[in-house]
Amino acid sequence: MVSVLDFEKPIVELEKKILELKSFASNNKKIDFASDIKRLEEKLEHLKQDTYSHLTSWQRVQIARHPRRPYTLDYISLIFADFLELHGDRIFAQDWAMVCGLSRLGNYKVAVIGHQKGRDTKENLKRNFGCAHPEGYRKALRVMQLAEKFNLPVVVFIDTPGAYPGIGAEERGQAQAIAVNLKEMMCISVPIVAIVIGEGGSGGALGIGVADRVGVLENAYYSVISPEGCAAILWKSGSKAPEAAGVLKLTAQELLKLGIIDEAIPEPLGGAHRAPQEIAQTLKDTIIRYLKELIPLPKEKLLEERYAKFRKIGVIG
């Protein structure tokens, strides 16, 4: 069953009418419906352009959470070759919410890391809805350090509502695990490229997001807190989430203006889920472009620029 967002219903209804008219026309050869079909298709194209070019921040959040949106493993299968997944943090357990491994991207050997959500209830329970535990962040750091040892660039896909806030995660040092990653990633001496492909929630996203290049997909978001969390704190009501999304400046376009990210990466009209192959090729080209810029840099310059990049965030004037 295809999920339809509220603001997409007029588009879906018009698409349905066109399909019905085409079906009727195929069964009634004596009547020419070509001009009617063309008129409706033109109307549909205008409606799509108008709708998707004037999305609110909250509507982009809804697209970022779309259940058919490509996840990390989807991009790995579409972009990379010979992916070998690595498991465990060598301290506590395997975290299925964090995917890590070694792979090939074109002519480059790389390490790949990313949050992973599930497609159904069973998989979401296994993947913890993309909310990683401390062992997930420790596994990610272990793989980054392995990549550094063998001089492999690191590619990161960010897609999480936030790090898991449960009692067990806190007992095992969730905050410390994220803090250690922030510190250590600043010193990893190989290129790191991070792409926010869906949700980029708080420290859960930043825990693998300290990178030389940070790109955000056009309909993804990257924020210190979810709109619902912000609304609950400021207005004591989750119903204010759409308003909170507007003031958080969490869209790719707004983040680019603020200098927090390097690029707002365009998506196919209607979102990445409407054309997975197309967005995968866009991401592949983008990541390779970043690697071509970063790999020739001396390690000292790479680390200096990464440090400066994050130090200037939040500076006004």
Image: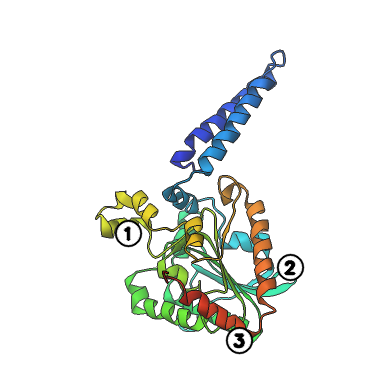
Q: CA distance from mark 2 to mark 3?
A: 26 Å
Callout 2: few (<14), some (14-19), or many (20+) C-alpha neighbours within 10 Å? Answer: few
Q: Left or right: where does residue 174 sit relative to residue 26?
A: left
- Judged from the image, the secondary structure of the residue bearing numbered disc 3 is helix
Q: Earlier in the sequence, mark 3 or mark 1?
A: 1
Q: Which residue is mark 3?
A: 300
Where residue 313 appears, x then y in whole percent? 45, 71
Q: Which one is in front, 36 or 73?
A: 36
Q: Residue furthest top?
A: 30
Mark 1 touches mark 2? (CB < 8 Å):
no
Q: Left or right: where does residue 281 sit relative to residue 246?
A: right
Kind of residue sitting beneath label 2? Gly
Res. 230 in view: yes
Q: Which one is in front, 84 or 189?
A: 189
Which labelled disc corresponds to residue 230? 1
- Mark nearest the camera among 3 and 1 is 3
Picture quadrant where residue 38 is located: top right
Q: Earlier in the sequence, mark 2 or mark 3?
A: 2
Where residue 301 appears, x then y in whole percent? 61, 83
Q: CA distance from mark 3 to mark 1?
A: 39 Å
Mark 2 touches mark 3? (CB < 8 Å):
no
Q: Residue furthest right?
A: 107
- Judged from the image, the secondary structure of the residue bearing numbered disc 2 is loop
Q: Which residue is mark 2?
A: 106
Residue found at x 60% / y 86%: 300
Where residue 271 appears, x then y in whole percent? 56, 49
- Judged from the image, the secondary structure of the residue bearing numbered disc 1 is helix
